[in-house]
């Protein structure tokens, strides 16, 4: 399902990113989504074919090209084989959780924190309806490894809040996350609104591909994340 209220990112054996523009928000309300059902398509062997497939899909669904951003990347070579508006920032929805979790795995790998370190689940971090709210009491401490798993598997909003608040806040998270890309980011990227761009996310996906042992938990959790709900 692609939501026309959010940014949609597709990672298969490439980084292919699509999104829609809206007013700045950090956390989305899934109950207010307007949805389009995405038809299954045949597997593509040549990445160059994807550009035409995306164009055909946009025409079929009468999508405004200026409101969509994507990039298709060969992760082995790093080459971008197709794109549109890939340097333009769009509201990212839950995609921000991927580089956020990666930063925590970097800290674990560097010995700066332990995977078992308890993180505080405060009232301000809570979002009704999430899996963390169902399984843990507000005011409790949750192991870092558990928060990471819930955030990646369930796209848990409370998990995202706990992680960036424990990291030093949203601004500090974005400042550190920008280091995953060699491309300079503008002020909008670092604002309190949830902006990302397709070029940046290609760099994020390439980092995961080049460091699969470091991010093995990220890869495994994303394999089983939100089955039947997202691409």
Image (cartoon, rainbow, N blue to C red):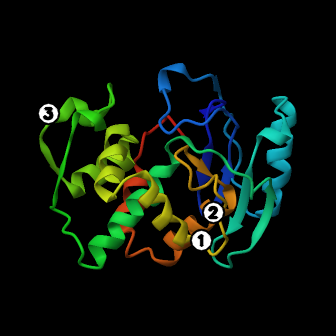
Residue 80 visible in the shown view: yes
Check the picture and name the quadrant holding the N terminus: top right
C-beta proximity under 8 Å, tags 1 and 3: no
Disc 3 target residue: 137
Lower sequence index among marks 1 and 3: 3
Q: Nearer the viewer, residue 166 or 228?
A: 166
The disc placed on residue 181 is 1
Q: Is residue 185 left or right of residue 158?
A: right
Q: Nearer the viewer, residue 126 or 199?
A: 126
Q: Is residue 231 visible?
A: no
Give the side of residue 99 with respect to residue 113, left or right: right
Image quarter of residue 106: bottom left
Contact (Cβ within 8 Å) of mark 3 with mark 2: no
10 Å crowding of disc 1: few (<14), some (14-19), many (20+): some
Q: Secondary structure at mark 2?
A: helix
Say whether marks 1 and 2 touch (CB < 8 Å): yes
């Amino acid at each position: 399902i692609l939501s026309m209220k959010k940014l949609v990112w597709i990672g298969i054996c490439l980084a292919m990113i699509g999104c829609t523009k809206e007013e700045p928000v950090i956390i989305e309300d899934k109950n207010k989504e307007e949805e389009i059902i995405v038809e299954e398509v045949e597997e593509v062997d040549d990445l160059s074919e994807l550009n035409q497939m995306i164009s055909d899909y946009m025409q079929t669904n009468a999508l405004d090209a200026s409101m969509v951003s994507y990039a298709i990347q060969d992760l082995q070579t790093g080459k971008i084989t197709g794109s549109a508006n890939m340097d333009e920032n769009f509201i990212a929805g839950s995609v921000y959780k991927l580089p956020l979790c990666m930063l925590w795995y970097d800290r674990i790998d560097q010995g700066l924190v332990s995977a078992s370190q308890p993180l505080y689940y405060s009232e301000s971090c809570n979002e009704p309806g999430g899996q963390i709210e169902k399984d843990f009491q507000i005011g409790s401490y949750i192991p870092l490894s558990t928060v990471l798993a819930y955030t990646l598997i369930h796209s848990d909003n409370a998990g995202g809040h706990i992680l960036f608040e424990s990291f030093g806040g949203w601004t500090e998270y974005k400042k550190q996350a920008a280091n995953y890309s060699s491309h300079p980011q503008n002020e909008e990227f670092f604002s309190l609104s949830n902006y990302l761009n397709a070029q940046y996310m290609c760099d994020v996906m390439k980092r995961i591909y080049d460091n699969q042992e470091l991010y093995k938990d990220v890869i495994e959790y994303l394999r089983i994340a939100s089955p039947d709900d997202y691409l």
